[in-house]
Image (spheres, grey):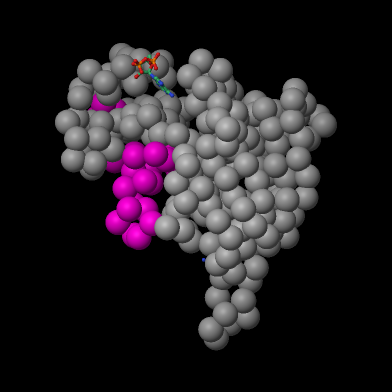
Amino acid sequence: RDVVELWSVTKVYGGAGGSPVTALDNVTAGFPEGTFTAVMGPSGSGKSTLMHCAAGLDRPTDGKVIVAGTDLGGLDETALTLLRRERVGFVFQAFNLVSALTAEQNVALPLRLAGRRPEPARARAALAEVGLAERAGHRPSELSGGQQQRVAIARALITRPAVLFADEPTGALDSRTSREVLGLLRRLVDEHRQTVVMVTHDPVAAAYADRLLLLADGRVAGEMSGDLDAEAI
Ligand code: ADP
Ligand code: ADP
């Protein structure tokens, strides 16, 4: 079963005034439940656009996006915002934690934003899951980059999203902390059947995935799956 489905998705930017750019050109792809997909491709090949359309952050010009069985094209802005909040998790290169809040408060934030109880015990369990139980009271400035990214991952997962999108999650980390974060993503897939979609430039990062989707000029130019080898990527 695919948690995210793209059917003939095309995204054209601009038009009025400047010349239009076709960022995605008729892309059809599925992201099966419990799999870890790496999306690679040269700069400008459409990776971010694909992720934004798949996550309901951006609407395609043409085609259909289905997330956890819901056709995003049938949702108005309010329903789309709710779906993003409840069903989709995001992790970014720059962590994007709130500096004035502790790790635990950052992790509980999506619950508060959704008008739900903050559930401190659940936030602490999520921090324990990413190996940071003893850092619950620390602010982001008191944590290393790798620790901050693990807090961001715990925050992204607190609503138990159907899919976790990670945009260059190791782009700001050194290779040792990158391995820590990638190992965590791998474990979430193996132990919790979390579906993960990660954009990366790094073949070593992509080798942690089960499947590689290669984009070029807004199209799927290749696909590899199974035991990915950084040398071969
Ligand atoms: P990647 O993530 O692989 O670098 P992007 O999805 O960011 O690629 O971009 C794909 C193409 O779409 C590029 O040509 C880029 O310049 C263009 N593009 C992306 N976002 C916008 C935008 N908001 N407005 C206009 N063009 C855009
Ligand atoms: P339950 O959902 O009944 O708590 P699980 O076995 O799914 O049981 O979860 C065990 C622990 O792992 C819980 O603390 C839960 O919050 C956490 N957990 C579950 N799924 C994930 C996930 N995808 N990522 C991170 N933590 C998770």
Q: Residue at x 19, y 30 (%)?
A: 118
Residue 99 belongs to magenta span = yes
The quadrant in which the C terminus is found is: top right
Q: Is residue 114 left or right of residue 162?
A: left
In the figure, is residue 101 to the left or right of 155?
Answer: left
Residue 167 locus on image (x, y percent): 53, 43
In the rendered structure, the answer to whether residue 112 lies left or right of residue 210 reads: left
Q: Residue at x 45, y 46 (%)?
A: 70
Question: In what quadrant of the picture does the N terminus appear?
Answer: top right
The image quadrant of residue 223 is top right
Q: Is residue 57 magenta?
A: no
Total numbered labels: 0
Q: Residue 64 at x, y = what percent?
A: 55, 56
Q: Residue at x 24, y 41 (%)?
A: 114
Q: Is residue 125 visible?
A: yes
The picture places residue 200, in percent across and down from the top left corner, at 62, 41
Q: Residue furthest right?
A: 232
Is 205 displayed left or right of 34 in the figure?
A: right
Q: Which residues are magenta?
A: 75-104
> Is 20 rendered above or below residue 169?
below
Hey, which residue is sitting farthest bottom in the picture?
A: 17
Closer to the camera in the image, 48 or 210: 210
User: Which residue is located at x 27 percent, y 23 percent?
Assistant: 123
Residue 32 image offset from top left, x and y in percent: 60, 33
Q: Is residue 193 above or below residue 62?
A: above
Question: Is there any visible trace of residue 151 in the rendered image?
Answer: no
Above/below status of 162 relative to 78: above
